[in-house]
Amino acid sequence: MSANHHQCPVAARGYQSPFTPRLLSLAVTAVALSASVTAQEPSIEMLEEIIVTTERREMRIQDVSATVEQFSANDLRNLGVNNDFKNLQNAVSGLNIAKQEGKVEVYLRGIGSSDSDFSSDPSVATHYNGVYLPRPRSIGPMFFDVSRVEVHKGPQGTVRGRNATGGSINIISNRPELDEFSGKLAVGTGDFDSNTAEVVFNVPVTDNFAVRGAFFSEQHDSYLTNEYGSGIEAPGSVDDQAWRISALWEATDALTVNLIIDASESDGTGQPGAFSGRALAAGFDMDDLDDPWNQYFLAEGEQESDQTGVSLTVQYQFETFAVEYSGSVRDYEFDNRNGGRIFQMGHVFPGTDREANFVEFFANPPSYPDNRTNLFPDLLNARDAFRQNEESTSQVHELRFFGGEDSFLRWSTGVFYMQEEFDNVSWNVNDGLGFAVPCGGNDVSWIDPPLPDDTICAFQDGLGGENRNDGSEVESMAVYFDGTLNISDATRVNFGVRWTDDTKTQVRTNLKYLLIAPGEAIEAFTGRPINRATDPATTGLIMGGNGFALAPPGGRSQPLPTDVCPNGDWFAPGCGGDPYNLEFFLGGIDRFGNGDNVDEFLAQFGDQVDVHITSDFYTDTNRSVRESNEYSASFVDWRLGVEYDLSDTQLLYAQVSTGTRSGGVNDPIITPDGEQVNREWGEEELTAYEVGSKNEFDLGTTALRLNAALFYYDFKDKTLQSLINVGLNRDSDGDGEEDTTSKVFVDNVGDAEVLGLEVESLWALPYGVDLKGNLLLADGTYEDAVTGDSRFSNPVLVPLDGNQLPYLSEVTLNLAVSQTIELNWGSLQSFDWTLSMNYRSEYFLSPYNGKGYADADGDGIGERVPLVEMVPNNSSPTASGGNGDANGNFFLDEVDAFAQFNLAAGLDFGTDGQFRLDGYVNNITEEAYSGKAFINRDVNIRFLNNPRTYGLRFSAVF
């Protein structure tokens, strides 16, 4: 039993459920009935009391007038969460966590955001030992030697501060213990060559000073398989190590100091999504595929992440109040390269074998396999993937005064400061083009005057080219007061207010490159003729192989180029010809990869290569490839609530609270029709209304905890993040359409509301059986919202009114039945098992909800059409591989209802039960579903859950 658990007559953790408007009467009835039963004397069966700190002080979870879930280390193990933060969503109703390309996105009760840029803050605040983490991804593999995880639902504007509109998640590690020397050793093994190890030691140095150390390691192979084979490992493998040292000093009865130092290193092959559009268009959803985790890859991915942190908490108790300082400094470095793919080649489904063979061999499908030319080695090295590197240093400081625990006014007040310095670089090197585009002669209509006939172009402008964010900064300061008035023994009033001032300074550099080389020089270097019949052309020049690395964030010290083509016009008069442009291009590359030869080619023939540069930032008013923007705002959040004790074990409460998510700055984006999109987005404001009841009942030989909460969210100026198409001012394939790329764009699209009912229960039955249930009924929709539909080449305005919020199911049901059997057979002490289920009704991955639109009048206003009639971008080699063009079902964004089952069982043995052997099977029926998607005209990229996994673990404590 963890340190924060005690035995009491009736108490427990529960389960939750929101609900839809049409079930309003049911919701009110549930809340009323949960408070109407008269509490009786405690039963023989004892429910475990749970202590939480969601209100910044220790409280019984049943005394908190809000919806809170808490999970001990044993809960995390038995419910299949284990050491993966993402798996927490399978245990918490309304929680959706997705990992995509190294990023972590968290949604709670339909409220969330994408952690894609330094200025795009999360909507669900993540805390580590009570200290705010600016980036959820900086958690790293820190889910070890954990005391508990607390999930507080609803806005926490006053109590937890910035960017907690959806709620907060607090990960709390075990503190050092002063009373005894102890330790733990745990090892595990499982399928996918999974291996884990955890070592913990606790050393009381003196009677008031102790040190605790913990080390964790995990490795496993990829959950994906590569249909191409060819010795290329599919992305998804993991190799993590982490450690933590904690020191606790109770210097006096009044002074306590807690210091934590931690570090982690994560290596692996990345977390890319799968091109899913063509499978969906052919009628194959994720659960229709024979193996959704079997996909096509041409190059290995790579992901490295390093985190270090130091946190300090100092508390001094005066006679009538206490003062506490808490702060941390955290650094993380992140490097990601997606596994290489052929555009639109993702899942394996009937017909893709022909597409795969066509792409691999560039053969005419009807004559395949005759007269084929195997170009796979060139593709393997030349078609590289998206790369991104980040570095962040953040510091968080808070000084808090609190007191009045036994007085009329219980209060807390303080000041909060957070500062983050952020550098990053992203670049889709090659983007499938490399030195591979014939661009000479009169037939190339988009180049005027024409280049010599044998000219070859290399565009390095994929996903916006080289993007750097060096020296950007976020700074936030807040002051707050929160209190509880004890009106009577049974009645209390809660109130609080917080003022926050945020400033974000964005310093961005953007460069897009076009390298122009004579074909004669390329043929002289490679010793073979250029094959212009293939698309892209086969030149023999290779760049971006494994080991290729960009210059690190903040690593660009060269003067910026001045020979820049204005307004995105690659061949504007007077543009090009400056040899410094090639030097600057090479300065953005730290090293070339294995098998690369472009560096050798440029060393020999660089004087014949002309480099043209354009930039999103270079305009008539800003004659530079760099610009700086600043966003600043101040806002006030507050809460007001009342609590009433019906009895010692029954609580009624009502509360109104607000939360604000800070705004930010977009990159400058010009759509293909020349329109400039909004540069800034404003704050999101959420007002939440919640009434609830918390109860504990004696039912004779059993005990029941039953809680219910009815809530309503009023969301103003909700933001929406999407990938929109951006024109590249070129037509590389000669199809008459301008080439496009995708860029992230955030905008305030309108309002939204969520109405829900959440019910939590724990029923302690005879024979050591516990039955837990979490039912969530929720209806979350957009109101008065309009957005530019990114599924068009030029955004078309479409209404979102009445559409369901992404990642929010109308029905979520979590059930867990567990049993502990006391054996007492010699050294066999006890046996326990837990069977858990997470059910979710259908939900959507985008705000479009499967609706199709057309711009029939050409006025930029969308009109409803069947989704199948929409037209995606079919200009990819796969369309010629045998299945033809994809239809509008390419854009499907619905995830079907599913139920995931997990099973865990363990045996405690030894003279004192100090040894444990346990096993687990997660996702028993191997349900496949998407937790995240990028959907626009070019792609429908899905990010999948984990397949079925199983394993054994052994642990020993001493």
Image: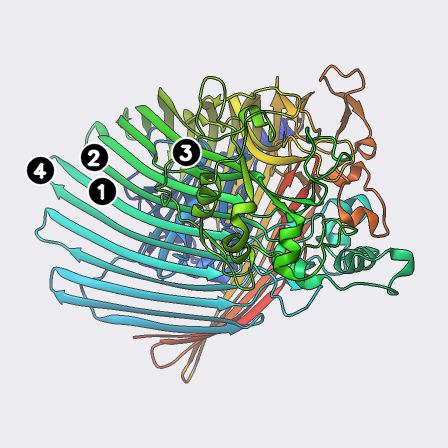
Give the Cα distance between marks 1 and 2.
8 Å
Element type at marker 2? strand
Left or right, 406 with respect to 854, comes to left
Asked whether the residues under the numbered discs 3 and 2 touch, taking CB atoms below 8 Å apart as contact, a structural biologist would say no
Three-letter amino acid code of the residue under disc 4: Glu
Name the residue at 54% across, 52% down: 605
Q: Of the two numbered discs 1 and 2 on the same chain, state the one appearing first in sequence.
A: 1
The residue to which callout 1 is attached is: 326
The residue to which callout 2 is attached is: 400
Q: In which image quadrant can residue 377 be found?
A: bottom right
Q: Residue 164 carries which label?
A: 3
Q: Considering depth in this image, is 152 or 759 the residue closer to the camera? A: 152
Asked whether the residues under the numbered discs 1 and 2 touch, taking CB atoms below 8 Å apart as contact, a structural biologist would say yes
Q: Position of residue 820 (x, y in %)?
A: 48, 67
Q: Of the two numbered discs 4 and 3 on the same chain, state the one appearing first in sequence.
A: 3
Three-letter amino acid code of the residue under disc 1: Ser
Q: Residues within 10 Å of mark 3 (few under 14, many from 20)?
A: many
Q: Of the two numbered discs 3 and 1 on the same chain, state the one appearing first in sequence.
A: 3
